[in-house]
Image: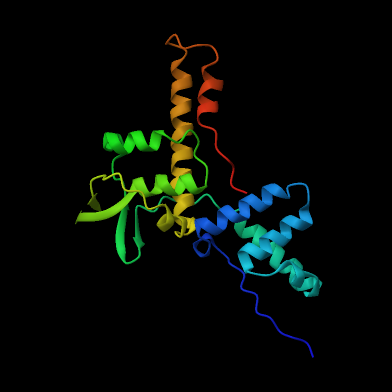
Amino acid sequence: MKKQIEIVVPNNWSAIPLRKYIELSKDLKSFEDDEEAQTAAMFFHLCDLEPLILPKIDAETFLRIKDDLYSFLSNNQLPLQQKINVNGVQYGFYPNLSKIEYGAYVDISKYNEMQLDEKWAEVMSILYRPITKTIGKLYEVEPYSGKIDRDVWLGITMDVHFGAWFFFINSSKELLKGILNSTKEVGFPPNIKSILEKSGQIIQAL
């Protein structure tokens, strides 16, 4: 008698928390030369499907699920979500980064690279805070207290994380472009481009 199993296939990043994404990323990197192992890791982390079950799935279903996973994994350039709900509390992305508190700036500056890992969860804990006041589309957030809730943000889904991450990536690109253009008029070192690129290194998502 055949045993039926239900396979739940996510179709967007709102179903994947940062904690699970980090685990998947580590396995994909460990098996970067083994496509079969990478596929098994995707099924395990994203569909909660044990590797021993994969050979028992019919080929048509297996290939369809694999295509669906690759399709949704490649769609990660998402917009910044300025307001989100965290455990029943409305949080807001810091509304004006040019005026962020010095303490918050110093703590974010401790991270040399913007990678989607445990440290990124700490950065998000600094950037997103409970909203204290709303006027139309404008809002204010709680002052920075130095408290870091890494575990909370490891449980926040990747649609939120990717939105903030790509916000910084795109902002950094624009900043780099502006600085490089200014080298024509200002006496920057000739290797300024490599210096800036090195200081802003990122891990490309999957």
Against 17, residue 200 (above or below) is above
Q: Specify whether 122 is left or right of 28.
A: left
Q: Specify whether 68 is left or right of 139.
A: right
Q: Specify whether 71 is left or right of 132.
A: right
Q: How many marks?
A: 0
**Where is residue 160 shown, x and y percent of the image?**
44, 55
**Where is residue 96 shown, x and y percent of the image?**
28, 40
**Where is residue 54 shown, x and y percent of the image?**
76, 70
**Where is residue 148 shown, x and y percent of the image?**
36, 49
Looking at this rendering, what residue extends furthest in the bottom direction? 1
Identify the residue shown where x is 74% and y is 85%. 3
Identify the residue shown where x is 30% and y is 34%. 98
Location of residue 42 by image quarter: bottom right
| Colour approach in the figure | rainbow
Looking at this rendering, what residue extends furthest in the top direction? 187
Identify the residue shown where x is 40% and y is 33%. 109
Location of residue 91 by image quarter: bottom left
Q: Specify whether 181 is left or right of 198.
A: left
Residue 136 in sight from this viewpoint: no
Residue 162 in sight from this viewpoint: yes
Against 168, residue 183 (above or below) is above
Against 170, residue 147 (above or below) is below
**The N terminus is located in which quarter?**
bottom right
